[in-house]
Image (tube, grey):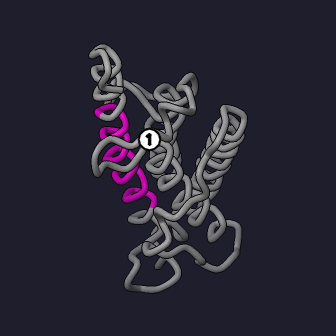
Amino acid sequence: MNNQSKLANRFREVILNGTWIANTNFKNELNNLDWKIAVEKYQNLNSIAILAQHIHYYIEGLKNVFLGANLEISDKYSFDFLQINSQEEWGNFLAKFWADSEEFAELIEKLTEEKLNENFVKEQYGTYFRNVDAMIEHSYYHLGQIVLIKKISSNLAEIPNLT
């Protein structure tokens, strides 16, 4: 298996279908989640919806570069999203998240070995390989947060008058 396939499979594991590293993935944690839980804030933590949108923001931004567009994402905007106000809006977001993730994985698989080792947009951003690997690591980081927030949510729901 070449490096591109390995990276694409690792990316799919964290977002779409894996259980090897974290025993779960984004799709498993989010697909059947009620939108009200997804948007609920606990103290100063980001909501599950914001964390999911944050990861999607980067996936979509990297995907667009892989498709030949300019890099148009910025860290300063990576948590700025419209509020989700219904289960339908949540479902629409998730459908786009999954579709963009699969498309990104397919684009990773199509990279040549040479492209994988080229600089990503600017030398300071490292190589394509490094950016995909960072996307995977970044995704696991926020997946862990989502799992913890879901546990907090379920524990608070069990205590009368605290939800």
State the image coordinates of residue 13 (x, y, percent, origin top left).
46, 35
Q: In this view, does 30 lie above or below 2?
A: above
Observer able to see residue 1: no
Could you tell whether 103 is left or right of 16 in the image? right
Residue found at x 39% / y 56%:
133
Observer able to see residue 18: yes
Q: Quarter of the image containing the C terminus?
A: top left
Q: Does the magenta stretch include residue 140?
A: yes
* Residue to which mark 1 is pinned: 48
Between residues 29 and 40, which one lies in front from this camera angle?
40
Name which residue type carries label 1.
Ile
Residue found at x 69% / y 76%:
69
Q: Label 1, secondary structure: give it.
A: helix
Res 97 → quadrant: top right
State the image coordinates of residue 1 (x, y, percent, origin top left).
48, 41
State the image coordinates of residue 91 (x, y, percent, origin top left).
68, 34
Residue found at x 64% / y 80%:
70
Q: In this view, does 163 lie above or below 26?
A: above
Q: In this view, does 58 lie above or below 13?
A: below
Res 148 → quadrant: top left
Between residues 63 and 97, which one lies in front from this camera angle?
97
Residue found at x 31% / y 14%:
158
Give the tally of numbered discs: 1
Could you tell whether 52 is left or right of 66 in the image? left
Could you tell whether 20 is left or right of 56 in the image? left
Check disc 1: other Cα within 10 Å, few if <14, some if 14-19, many if 20+: many
- Magenta span of residues: 132-148
Residue furthest bottom in the image? 123
Q: Is the magenta stretch mostly helix, strand or loop?
A: helix
